[in-house]
């Protein structure tokens, strides 16, 4: 693992914990902001959940389901989670911090993972990357899917193996903590 990759992976988590504390202190949520933010976060969880049922890390290049529209549907869903929490907090400053964190760290993480996938799958990945955007999805599929995919349908067991349910638990806890802030601040 390169030194640059180590930096982004190590500091993404450490900075995320610090950001969560600062976000909580700066947030001034209202019932409406929490409700709107939770709706966006739920949409992000649905995207992530759909992607997790197709992802077989280190086994095959995922190009089916949400991966036919964006190479990073998990992070695209996480973008909706970040946007949801930015809105739920009811503070422009807290929201901008969350969105800046997401943009800075997750762009680098996507690039690092892209490098790993290119190394692992070579020309198959290059062909996939040429027709499917990195982050913002295309509205329609383009071309045929890669032959490296071993199973092209959603799998609940795969969703569970990828432990995506932890995102659901974490998002629920996050919304609860924002409600706690409303109760304390209110």
Image (spheres, helix red, strand yellow):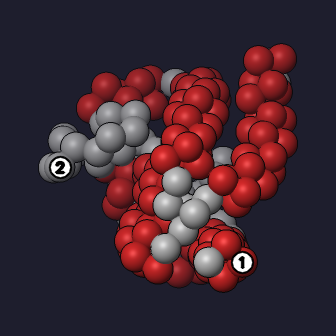
The kind of secondary structure element at disc 1 is helix
Residue 32 image-quadrant placement: bottom left
Q: Residue at x 41, y 24 (%)?
A: 126
**Between 92 and 170, the one nearer to me in the picture:** 92
Q: Quadrant of the N terminus?
A: top right
* Mark found first going from the N terminus, 1 or 2: 2
The CA span between labels 1 and 2 is 42 Å
| Figure check: 24 above or below 177 | above
Mark closer to the observer (1, 2): 1
| Figure check: 144 above or below 35 | above
Q: Position of residue 136 (x, y in %)?
A: 32, 40
Q: Position of residue 25 (x, y in %)?
A: 73, 57
- Which residue sits furthest front? 186
Q: Quadrant of the C terminus?
A: bottom right
Mark number, residue 139: 2
Q: Is residue 169 visible?
A: no
Q: Residue at x 74, y 49 (%)?
A: 22
Q: Residue at x 38, y 30 (%)?
A: 129
**Between 116 and 14, the one nearer to me in the picture:** 14
**Between 155 and 135, the one nearer to me in the picture:** 135
Horizontal arrangement in the rendering, residue 55 relative to residue 126 (left or right): right
Mark number, residue 184: 1
Q: For the residue carrying disc 1, how many other residues have a C-alpha within 10 Å: few (<14), some (14-19), or many (20+)?
A: few
- Count of marks overlaid on the render: 2
| Figure check: 136 above or below 38 | above
**Between 90 and 154, the one nearer to me in the picture:** 90
Horizontal arrangement in the rendering, residue 18 relative to residue 140 (left or right): right
The kind of secondary structure element at disc 2 is loop
Q: Is residue 180 visible?
A: yes
């Amino acid at each position: 693992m390169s030194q640059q990759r180590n930096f982004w992976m190590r500091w993404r988590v450490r900075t995320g914990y610090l950001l969560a504390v600062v976000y909580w202190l700066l947030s001034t949520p209202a019932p409406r902001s929490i409700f709107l933010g939770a709706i966006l976060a739920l949409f992000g969880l649905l995207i992530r959940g759909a992607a997790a049922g197709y992802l077989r890390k280190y086994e095959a290049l995922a190009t089916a389901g949400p991966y036919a529209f964006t190479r990073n549907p998990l992070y695209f869903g996480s973008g909706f989670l970040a946007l949801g929490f930015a809105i739920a907090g009811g503070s422009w400053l807290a929201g901008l911090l969350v969105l800046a964190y997401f943009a800075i760290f997750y762009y680098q993480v996507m690039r690092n993972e892209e490098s790993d996938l290119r190394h692992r799958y070579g020309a198959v990945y290059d062909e996939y990357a040429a027709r499917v955007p990195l982050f913002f999805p295309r509205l329609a599929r383009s071309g045929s899917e890669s032959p490296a995919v071993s199973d092209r349908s959603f799998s609940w067991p795969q969703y569970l193996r990828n432990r995506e349910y932890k995102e659901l638990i974490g998002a629920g806890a996050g919304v609860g903590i924002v409600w706690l802030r409303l109760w304390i601040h209110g």
